[in-house]
């Protein structure tokens, strides 16, 4: 797969590079999200040499030596260097960078630098000192990347962290959006791309596993449900890199993936004391793997007792639902049962999770493009004992609310689906307020003539999967 998407991120890098003064970018994100690919793709188009160095999980002494040798060779090309050469400290190494960048633009890329910070907790303070005393007055463009979210948070993002306020830009690189898969997998149709998105969550390294010259079943048999697939082990790495004792966190994820969403039932399924479950969920939320949802009509969600915990990382959700239960068999090359179950249940899984999420994403995107009658303050769903609604977008100030229904069935959406949502509207609206109600219906294929006729009576929007994908792609290519 060639380099795709990332137009916004590339534009940011170009803009920062063209500024005349010192620039400091911290680029972070989960494993395999494409940080290295983004940086090297951009740097490969520069008209001048640049230093790219990737840290490894080794000792602090080795890391300093490895960087010192890479820096010395960059600053002194062709000069013979002894194998044991090292600057005495990181301060001395950065002083050399500042000296060289005093009168010329110099790009220094330190990839996976969170490994250095992990090995030597003093390094962030040394970078702070170097930046404050020398680097910020030079013409350096310093780029630090990292996959260890906890370390990046403690050393660069928190208010009391050593590097807080030093970086010009802090960018968390996200997985591909669904709209980007049209470019990544052009030979697939919309439904096939939804299937890929369901399994990969848009993580570039996982998307790259799919060959769009093969159908989905062929990809599962030949490339996905195999012992060699990195997706089989990455869930362990994601947690082990971030957490000292991942066992209980795995148990929590397994419980949520099995369909348990309340605090008490998650604790019971995970075998964790009810009084301790909140701290595990808090860490998983901080890492971006789990989210606490409340009905979109709740004005103060942090105070609501209606919270439900869900796995928001699509890869982890897919892994714990389909791969984890069969991991041992897959490792031994026994893949038929896992492949059969995955293929048989994938469509239901898409309808239950991915399609509804994409519909809510669509609401946010078209609102941002100015194509909704109002700008939502919250977009989510609604549930109560009386009613459930897949998509709810609300603006409390303007008193606008959008209600939406998502149908992933094979046939066209029927009139009864339209009427059912109309009928339960009063059970969803917050009381004591006069609301302007808007409607949207999402269908995998289309809508029957009777459904279209009824929807038109309330100016409801009807969105097919093809239209949803086109709108998301249009957002990426303004």
Image: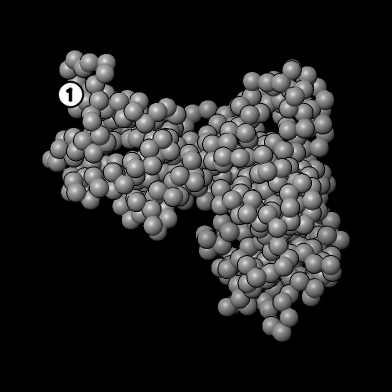
Q: Nearer the viewer, residue 448 or 142?
A: 142
Instruction: Identify whether 468 is placed above or below 196.
Output: below
Element marked by disc 1: loop
Residue 354 percent across, percent down from the top left:
70, 46
Which residue is most to the left?
103
Q: Residues within 10 Å of mark 1 (few under 14, many from 20)?
A: few
**Left or right position of 122 against 199:** left
Is residue 166 shown left or right of residue 218? left
Q: Is residue 61 left or right of residue 412?
A: left
Residue 436 appears in which quarter of the rendering?
bottom right
Depth check: give the residue in front, 417 or 306: 306
Q: Residue at 34%, 51% (x, y): give it.
A: 162
Kindly tell me whether residue 344 is visible in this rendering: yes
Residue 141 horizontal/vertical position (percent): 27, 42
Residue 40 seen:
no
Mark 1 = which residue? 76
Residue found 67% across the figure and 66% down from its top: 296
Residue at figure coordinates x 59%, y 51% from the top left: 283
For the image, the number of numbered tags is: 1
Along the line of sight, the residue nearer the viewer: 308 or 361: 308
Which color mode does the image show? one colour
Please name whichever residue, 290 or 13, is drawn nearer the observer in this view of the structure: 290
The picture quadrant where one finds residue 452 is: bottom right
How far across and how far down the image is residue 147, in percent?
48, 39
Q: Position of residue 256 (x, y in %)?
A: 74, 48
Identify the residue at horizontal 56%, vertical 52% (top origin).
286
């Amino acid at each position: 797969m060639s380099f795709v998407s990332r137009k916004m991120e590339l534009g940011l890098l170009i803009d920062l590079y063209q500024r005349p003064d010192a620039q400091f970018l911290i680029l972070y994100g989960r494993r395999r999200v494409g940080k290295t690919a983004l940086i090297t793709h951009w740097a490969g188009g520069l008209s001048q040499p640049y230093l790219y160095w990737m840290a490894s999980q080794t000792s602090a002494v080795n890391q300093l030596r490895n960087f010192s040798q890479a820096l010395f060779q960059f600053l002194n090309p062709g000069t013979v260097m002894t194998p044991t050469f090292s600057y005495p400290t990181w301060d001395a190494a950065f002083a050399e960078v500042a000296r060289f960048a005093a009168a010329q633009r110099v790009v220094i890329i330190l990839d996976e630098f969170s490994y250095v910070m992990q090995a030597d907790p003093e390094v962030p303070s040394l970078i702070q000192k170097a930046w404050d005393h020398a680097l910020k007055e030079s013409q350096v463009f310093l780029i630090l990347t990292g996959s260890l979210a906890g370390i990046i948070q403690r050393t660069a993002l928190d208010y009391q962290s050593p590097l807080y306020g030093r970086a010009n830009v802090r960018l968390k690189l996200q997985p591909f959006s669904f709209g980007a898969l049209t470019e990544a997998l052009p030979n697939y149709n919309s439904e096939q791309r939804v299937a890929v998105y369901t399994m990969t969550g848009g993580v570039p390294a996982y998307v790259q596993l799919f060959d769009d010259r093969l159908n989905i079943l062929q990809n599962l048999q030949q490339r996905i449900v195999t012992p060699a697939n990195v997706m089989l082990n990455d869930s362990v790495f994601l947690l082990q890199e971030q957490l000292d004792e991942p066992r209980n966190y795995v148990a929590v994820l397994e419980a949520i993936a099995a369909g348990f969403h309340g605090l008490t039932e998650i604790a019971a399924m995970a075998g964790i004391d009810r009084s301790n479950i909140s701290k595990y969920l808090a860490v998983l939320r901080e890492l971006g793997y789990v989210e606490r949802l409340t009905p979109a009509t709740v004005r103060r969600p942090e105070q609501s007792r209606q919270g439900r915990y869900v796995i928001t990382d699509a890869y982890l959700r897919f892994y714990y639902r389909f791969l984890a239960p069969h991991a041992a068999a897959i490792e031994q090359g026994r893949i038929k049962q896992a492949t059969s179950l995955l293929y048989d249940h994938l469509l239901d899984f898409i309808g239950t999770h991915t399609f509804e999420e994409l519909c809510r994403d669509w609401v946010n995107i078209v609102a941002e493009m100015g194509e909704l009658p109002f700008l939502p303050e919250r977009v989510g769903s609604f549930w109560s004992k009386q009613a459930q609604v897949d998509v709810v977008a609300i603006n409390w100030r303007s008193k606008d609310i959008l209600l939406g229904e998502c149908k992933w069935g094979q046939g066209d959406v029927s009139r009864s689906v339209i009427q059912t949502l109309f009928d339960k509207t009063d059970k969803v609206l917050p009381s004591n307020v006069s609301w302007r109600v808007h409607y949207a219906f999402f269908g995998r294929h289309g809508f029957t003539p009777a459904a279209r006729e009824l929807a038109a009576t309330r100016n409801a929007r009807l969105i097919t999967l093809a239209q949803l994908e086109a709108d998301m792609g249009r957002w990426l290519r303004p």
